[in-house]
Amino acid sequence: MFRTLIPSLGALLLCASFGLQAQAGKRVDCSQAADPRACELRKERAARARDMHKNAAEVCKTRPSAEQRECMRVQMCQQAKDPARCEENAKKNAERRDLVLEACKGKQGAVLRQCMREEYKKLPPQK
C-alpha cells in the first residue's frame, strides 16, 4: 500500500509547488493598492533599475571579478538622473559594506549573511 501511496504523494507535492511558484511570480496589482499612482511609480522605477542593472552587467561581464563591482557602479551611475549624487551614495554604501564585512570577517554562508544583517542594523541610518 505504501509503495503506491508514496509516489502519488510526491507527485501531488510537486504539483503544489509549481502552483506556489506561479503565485509568487505574479506582479503587484496597483489597482488594489492604497495609493495606485505611487504604486505605479514604484513599479516604473523598479523596471528602470532592472534595465540599468541589466545594461551595466552586459558591459561589465568581461571584466575580472575584482574590477566588476567598480565597473557596475560606474555604468549604473552614468545612467542615473543625477550621476554625482549616485556616485556619492555608492561610495557611502561601499564604506558601510566594508565596515560590515570587516565585522563579519572569517564567516561564511548562512552565518555570514546573518552576521551582515545584524551589523547593518547596528549602523546609523543613511541620510
Image (spheres, rainbow, N blue to C red):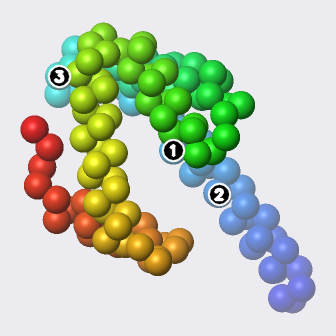
- Please give the count of numbered marks on the rendered protein: 3
Amino acid under disc 1: Ala
Report the mark closest to the observer, 2 or 3.
3
* Camera-nearest residue between 21 and 63: 63
Q: CA distance from mark 2 to mark 3?
A: 33 Å
Q: Residues within 10 Å of mark 2 (few under 14, many from 20)?
A: few
x then y, percent, for residue 89: 25, 33
Amino acid under disc 2: Ala
Amino acid under disc 3: Asp
Write down the residue under mark 1.
24
Residue in view at x 48 percent, y 21 percent: 75
First in sequence: mark 3 vs mark 1: 1
Residue in view at x 37 percent, y 72 percent: 104
Write down the residue under mark 3.
35
Q: Which mark is residue 16?
A: 2
First in sequence: mark 2 vs mark 3: 2
* Mark 1 secondary-structure assignment: helix
x then y, percent, for residue 110: 49, 73
* Camera-nearest residue between 10 and 106: 106
